[in-house]
Image (spheres, grey):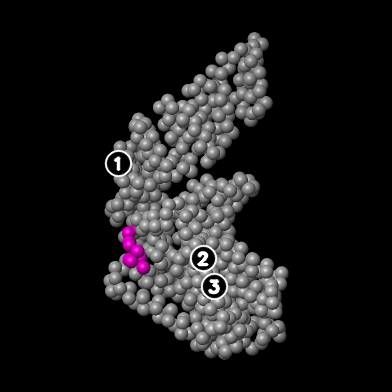
């Protein structure tokens, strides 16, 4: 066996390589740090109270686990961003860029280790993938280093990854990839270490395997795409460590079956977190889509081929946040469906045929296909998104570099070609990121590429309405022209009409949205608010109750339900919902104020004062609460004897020195008594 470590020696030149990767990453993403939150960023970050970490303690960690998205590691990272910078987008984007750079470095190490292992355990590897001397002889620019560096840099600057990096919420995707690669690297180092032992495991090897397992779990807890990791590890083991051995392949097959079983168990666990039976959840995903399961499977044959074309030629004019991707209804409708099937079948067949002669090339193809299984098969997700290529594209970049070295013998020409590709894609990435800096520009860009996409018009209308409501309504109506039965667009138009005091029209739209989607919580909530303003307390109660039934963790719905109950005289029942609203959102000063109002109606001014104080502690500048506190304090003091009133005010001044109202009333009362 050659005296080569699986990762090669760590040296000065690798540090230079890492610095170059970092510099490129920072430069091409330097324009995104003030990019706004868009689309799912709002629900996952801005409106997600579970990630509003104010203290780092076990209670706050438990709260993060309650987040609607069952991706606790990614949610923890968002919570830490909130802890250090609230909703300042700079911190979130900095972390995203940092993760992307780390992923490029991990890819460098993974490719380098794989090339070395392939040479160690596969001596018959193609000569073009050998190198003239190991790093142990001092030749630091060995072939694995050059190929790994080229692969990592080409992958890093590919503009296709802007959606995974610049779109804040897709940190879930890049974090999963980061832990995925870390798990692979630790496994490789553990197996390589194990090769040198006659029996058993050394302490170092044990920790490497445990580390691999922990990273794998962290990857899965970042995003479900990591469920493919066990299968990839099994394939890697068989390809590179077992040397395709037919004797040990039975064990490998058993392990493969085990890994597939693990994927199924994980899928069931993830789906169970969403509530409901497996069949209900599976069917509900398609209930909200414009396609059936067979249509999705047929369409994905073309989508996967389109992903390949985007990886190879990621011109910004071909990139979009959402696509108008036509459905496939059969293998020949459209005819490109069977072409897509042929490409995927051909790649699969080639990977199988090439496995003995060129297992590294075969592994690159298998890596791409296997890592698309989760999001490009039977699960009823949207048909196409660029971020799904983030992890699968890594080995495609290696495949490209390998082919370049195989067919181009002039090393200077190779260096020139790779340099031009890196430079060109860097420029494209920087250009693409400028679109993400302006929410309206992002949606206009999307509409120019997907003119029939109703979702694009809806988001453009919502963004424009913040500055020009009339123009925003125009675009929302365009969305409804493209897709008449669009609950989200009906809801958005209802909100716009509500802001224009067109309450009757808004109520009709909310009801239409709910008819199309009975579990549309926001529509139930807004309809309840509109009905309160129109005096229909019974109707408001009904819709707030449905919102709470659908999502018991909805603090706003509990608060409004408390308001309805309070106004209809059910004061004790109102307190139950107010208390639940505060449990879910302890910083909600409006609910504290409303509880104070409730206690005033119950004839308990002392308790009312306590909650008005809590409201002011949460929001000192609230004039409405200040007025309420002044009024109830006057009632309370008038009910006491002068000496008791003075003592009560002294107590309040001592307990709440920050509230000037108590000090003012104490001075006034003392002056009155002295006079």
Q: Please name the residue shown 36% across and 78% down the image.
A: 342
Return the x and y of residue 103 as percentages of the image width and height. Answer: 57, 67
Check disc 1 and report its element: helix, strand or loop. helix
Residue 508's disc is 1
Q: Residue at x 35, y 35 (%)?
A: 539
Q: Is residue 464 left or right of residue 103?
A: left
| Front-most of residues 431 and 383 | 383
The kind of secondary structure element at disc 2 is helix
Point out residue 446 in the picture as x, y percentages from the top left corner. Answer: 39, 60
Q: Nearer the viewer, mark 3 or mark 1?
A: 3
Mark pair 3, 1: CA separation: 57 Å
Q: Which residues are magenta?
A: 289-297
Q: Residue furthest top?
A: 675
**Which residue is labeled 3 in the image?**
255
Question: Mark 3 Cα within 10 Å, few/some/many (few <14, many 20+)?
Answer: some
Residue 276 position in % (x across, y down):
43, 52
Q: Say whether disc 2 or disc 1 marks the residue closer to the N-terminus.
A: 2
Residue tagged 2: 262
């Amino acid at each position: 066996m050659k005296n080569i470590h699986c990762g090669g020696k760590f040296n000065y030149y690798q540090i230079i390589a890492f610095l170059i990767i970092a510099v490129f990453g920072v430069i091409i993403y330097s324009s995104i740090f003030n990019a706004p939150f868009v689309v799912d960023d709002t629900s996952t970050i801005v409106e997600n109270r579970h990630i509003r970490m104010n203290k780092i303690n076990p209670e706050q960690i438990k709260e993060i686990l309650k987040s609607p998205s069952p991706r606790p590691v990614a949610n923890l990272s968002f919570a830490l961003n909130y802890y250090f910078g609230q909703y300042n987008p700079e911190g979130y984007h900095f972390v995203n860029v940092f993760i992307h750079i780390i992923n490029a470095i991990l890819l460098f190490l993974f490719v380098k280790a794989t090339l070395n292992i392939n040479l160690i355990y596969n001596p018959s590897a193609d000569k073009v993938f050998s190198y003239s001397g190991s790093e142990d002889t001092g030749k630091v620019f060995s072939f694995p280093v050059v190929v790994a560096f080229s692969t990592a840099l080409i992958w890093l600057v590919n503009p296709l990854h802007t959606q995974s990096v610049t779109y804040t919420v897709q940190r879930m995707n890049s974090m999963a990839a980061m832990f995925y690669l870390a798990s692979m690297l630790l496994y490789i180092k553990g197996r390589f270490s194990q090769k040198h032992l006659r029996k058993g495991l050394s302490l170092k090897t044990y920790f490497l395997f445990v580390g691999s397992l922990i990273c794998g779990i962290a990857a899965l807890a970042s995003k479900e795409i990591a469920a493919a990791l066990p299968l990839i590890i099994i394939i890697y083991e068989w390809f590179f460590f077992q040397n395709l051995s037919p004797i040990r392949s039975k064990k490998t097959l058993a392990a493969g079956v085990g890994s597939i079983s693990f994927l199924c168990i994980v899928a069931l666990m993830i789906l169970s977190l969403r509530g409901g039976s497996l069949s209900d959840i599976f069917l509900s995903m398609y209930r909200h889509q414009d396609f059936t399961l067979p249509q999705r499977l047929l369409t994905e044959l073309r989508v996967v081929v389109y992903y390949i074309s985007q990886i190879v030629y990621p011109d910004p004019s071909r990139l979009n946040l959402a696509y108008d991707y036509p459905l496939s209804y059969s293998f020949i409708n459209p005819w490109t469906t069977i072409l897509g099937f042929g490409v995927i079948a051909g790649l699969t067949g080639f990977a199988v045929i090439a496995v003995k002669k060129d297992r590294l090339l075969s592994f690159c193809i298998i890596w791409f296909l296997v890592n698309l299984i989760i999001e490009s098969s039977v699960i009823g997700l949207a048909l196409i998104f660029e971020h799904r290529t983030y992890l699968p594209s890594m080995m495609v970049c290696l495949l490209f570099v390998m082919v370049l070295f195989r067919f181009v013998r002039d090393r200077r020409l190779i260096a020139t070609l790779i340099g031009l590709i890196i430079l060109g894609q860097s420029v494209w990435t920087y250009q693409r990121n400028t679109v993400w800096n302006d929410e309206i520009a992002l949606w206009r860009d999307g509409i120019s590429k997907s003119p029939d996409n109703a979702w694009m018009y809806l988001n453009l209308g919502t963004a424009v309405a913040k500055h020009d409501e009339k123009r925003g309504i125009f675009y929302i109506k365009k969305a409804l022209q493209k897709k008449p039965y669009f609950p989200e667009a009906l809801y958005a138009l209802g909100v716009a009409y509500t802001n224009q005091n067109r309450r009757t029209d808004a109520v009709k739209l909310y009801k239409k949205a709910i008819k199309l989607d009975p579990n549309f919580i926001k529509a139930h909530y807004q309809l309840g608010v509109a009905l309160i303003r129109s005096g229909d307390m019974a109707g408001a109660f009904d819709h707030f109750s449905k919102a709470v039934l659908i999502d018991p963790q909805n603090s706003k719905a509990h608060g409004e339900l408390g308001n309805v109950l309070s106004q209809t005289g059910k004061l004790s029942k109102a307190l139950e919902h107010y208390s639940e609203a505060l449990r879910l959102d302890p910083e909600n000063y409006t609910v504290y104020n409303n509880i104070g109002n409730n206690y005033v109606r119950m004839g308990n001014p002392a308790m009312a004062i306590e909650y008005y104080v809590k409201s002011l502690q949460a929001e000192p500048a609230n004039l409405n609460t200040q007025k309420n506190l002044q009024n109830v304090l006057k009632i309370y003091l008038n009910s006491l004897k002068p000496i008791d009133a003075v003592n009560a005010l002294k107590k309040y001044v001592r307990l709440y020195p920050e509230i000037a109202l108590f000090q003012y009333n104490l001075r006034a009362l003392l002056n009155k008594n002295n006079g």
